[in-house]
Image: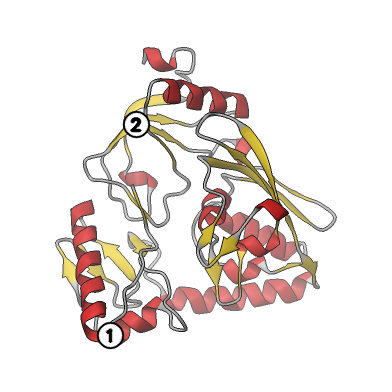
Amino acid sequence: MSLFAGLEHVVQQDVPLASFNSLRIGGNAAYFAVPTSQAELQELVRRARAAGMPMRVLGDGANVLIPSQGWHGLVIQLSAPDFTAISVTANGLNVGGGTKLAHFVSMAAREGFKGPEQLVGIPGTIGGALHVNTSTTGGNIGAWVKQATVLTAAGEVLVRKREQLNFSYRQSSLNELAIIAAEFEFEREPSELVVRRMQKLWIVRKSKQPLLDEPCAYVFKDHGGSTATQVLTKAGAQGMKSGAVEVSDRDPNFFVARQGATSADFLDLVAKTKQQVLDRLAIELELAVDVW
């Protein structure tokens, strides 16, 4: 622990990661840190970088596949209050990178900010959502960003203005180590209308997804004018499985991890479903999961 001397209050060793992701798969992290301030975050990164230690930032673990053999580096989680604050401005919200996407969506709806209600029911944090430009048919989170505060792998804090950012389908130019905070701007609408629309969307979305207590991940990106769900259904992916990981019977673009599932099971099922889609439809699907 000498590498992180003086930071023992925020760093633990040999921490199991299975409980920190939606698939509940993953071995131990050599080091796991929950910094309480930006200064602590920067110091952690500087020390790890100087030691040549690999680093990853873990949000709430949605759509992340962590190796069953673990992560031999530093895992950082921005779940402390300094990174999860959310405040209302005249035209939008200032949001910490570790803020739950659900909190962001509900706050925007209550304030009468139009747009984020389209993301209801999608798991994740603001940092993770911006990194992959979380999208639905109704919109994407990048459309509302005014600026983002990021941390580089060298421990430097930078502010990226809207004109410096690029967002496309499930991609963004925000590829630094961590997104510390972001400022959003929205159009206004009577809050009761936004809330009502959010509630309807939530009911529809949850009726089509795996049950809340099922360890799962949303696996592939949509392809062309079809959703990945439509492509997988057409290719007959329902019922496929590998080891303890299986295609969800509610939506084939969700893989469910049963008791004893491993990262190898998951990747094997990815390979099998991709190949079946390629063989039957001549479509090559792209992975939406962040594989460590």
Colour scheme of the picture: secondary structure
Quarter-of-image position of residue 201: bottom right
Side of 168 where 285 appears, left or right: left
Residue 107, percent across and down?
69, 58
Q: Residue furthest left?
A: 243
Location of mark 2 (residue): 73
Q: Quick one: 16 or 234, which is closer to the camera?
A: 234
Location of mark 1 (residue): 281
Side of 44 where 145 appears, left or right: right
Q: Quick one: 5 or 105, which is closer to the camera?
A: 5
Q: Nearer the viewer, mark 1 or mark 2?
A: 1
From the viewer's perspective, is residue 154 above or below residue 185?
above
- Image point 42% across, 50% down: which residue? 61
- Image point 38% across, 45% down: which residue? 20
Three-letter amino acid code at disc 1? Leu
Three-letter amino acid code at disc 2? Gly
Q: Considering the numbered disc 2 on the image, is that residue within a helix, a strand or a loop?
A: strand
From the viewer's perspective, is residue 193 above or below residue 142?
below
Quarter-of-image position of residue 163: bottom right
- Image point 43% across, 20% down: which residue? 50
Quarter-of-image position of residue 62: bottom left
Residue 179, percent across and down?
58, 43
Label 1 environment density (alpha carbons within 10 Å; few <14, some 14–19, many ≥20): few
Label 2 environment density (alpha carbons within 10 Å; few <14, some 14–19, many ≥20): some
Q: Considering the numbered disc 1 on the image, is that residue within a helix, a strand or a loop?
A: helix
Specify the label residue 224 is tagged with. none
Residue 191, percent across and down?
77, 70
